Image: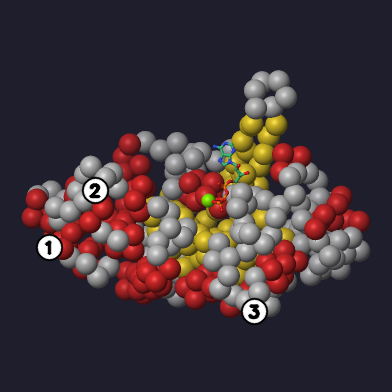
Amino acid sequence: MTGKSLEIRNVSKIYRIGGLIGATKIAAVDRVNLSLSLEAGQAQVLSLVGESGSGKTTLARMILHLVQPTHGEIIIDGMNTGGRLSRSQLRIFRRRAQPIFQNPFESFSSRKTVDSYLFETARNILGAKSKADAYKAVDEALVNVGLSAERVIGRYPNQFSGGELQRISVARAMIPHPELLVADEPVSMIDASMRMNVVNLFKKLRDEFNVTILYITHDLSTAYYVSDRIAIMYRGNIVESGPSAAVLKKPVHPYTELLLDSVAKIGEKWGEVVRLPDMETKEYGYVGCKFAERCPYVRDICRKVKPPMVAAEDGREVLCFKPVDYEDVEQKQVTK
Ligand SMILES: Nc1ncnc2c1ncn2[C@@H]1O[C@H](COP(=O)(O)OP(=O)(O)OP(=O)(O)O)[C@@H](O)[C@H]1O
Ligand SMILES: [Mg+2]
């Protein structure tokens, strides 16, 4: 495996809404750059947080090759996956990157036993040649999530709790030994008492199988707990990213500050607290900073010029004029 397991270069997804006449465009994901390297060969967990509609799922679906980016490149372990892939490339890709979705009861049909999904993955993605090989792969994956083939085979989704079913989703995703797991709000639909169980599983998989995990969440407390790095998304942009502890303890971007202020303490969701004014569709092609209207530090330049991505010494990047000298921003080579 190369040094960078996931690299997102200048990726956008533009949606057109409405008919031919009066159609508007929105940038669900707007020129995102993000890379996740293996630090000294060690995989990391990256949390992607942001309020509803900020573009997290769209970004995740592009990484998973379920949605085609409008612009930009996505490179997973050296393989450019943003464009079209042939059948054989797709097979390779599915071995490298696997999804875990939000609602485990939707991931499995109620009419099929859950093991059918596991065996299908073992055969079609891992490439198990015999029944015995497939069984071995399925059992191993289930044992790694605290279950076993014996306990799971022959049962239907309604015979499991949401937490168990989500662990089975994780086991399914791990069957081909992927390098990257993309988990889109994997614990939001399951019982609060079972959440840490799944979150802890991510740490274990990172450490034991060196799998890079993109963990999408609204929940700052689990993000803080589980992730090595964090990226904060606001209206299609990653406005701040860096080591989780640094970003959450000492936010630099005014939006990260606002998020942390609006949760009375780490551990509460902010979805209900922070409301977005309805201006998304006007933002396409917006020249300045999208956060300018809500920013307590706003200056004239913020409304006129797209903010630079500023790199700080602690490994953090912030899309903002605030950390730089506003006046000489144009002379400084801080933009990526
Ligand atoms: N297929 C689509 N067609 C048009 N607009 C879309 C489509 N998918 C997403 N969007 C828009 O893109 C923006 C980002 O949506 P996305 O689902 O990625 O956000 P999110 O951060 O995952 O939100 P949530 O936290 O609610 O899951 C939203 O404004 C959404 O309405
Ligand atoms: Mg989403």
Residue type marked 2: Tyr
Name the kind of residue labelled 1 in the image: Glu
21 displayed left or right of 101: right
Q: Within the displayed image, which quadrant is ligand 1 positioned in?
A: top right
Q: Earlier in the sequence, mark 3 or mark 2?
A: 2
Mark 3 lies within 8 Å of ligand 1 (Cβ measured)? no
Residue 91 place in picture, x, y as percent: 31, 44
The nearer-to-camera label among 1 and 3 is: 1
* Residue picked out by circle 2: 117
Q: Can you tell which quarter of the image residue 240 is in?
A: bottom right
- Mark 1 lies on a secondary structure that is helix
**Looking at the image, can residue 62 be seen?**
yes
Dot 1 and dot 3 residues touching (CB under 8 Å): no
* Left or right of 65, for residue 147: left
Residue 249's label in the rendered image is 3
- 232 sits to left or right of 175: right
- Give the residue at x 78% y 53%: 289
Q: Quadrant of residue 18?
A: top right
Instruction: Name the residue at 28% across, 44% down.
Output: 109
Ligand 2 lies under 8 Å from the Cβ of mark 2: no
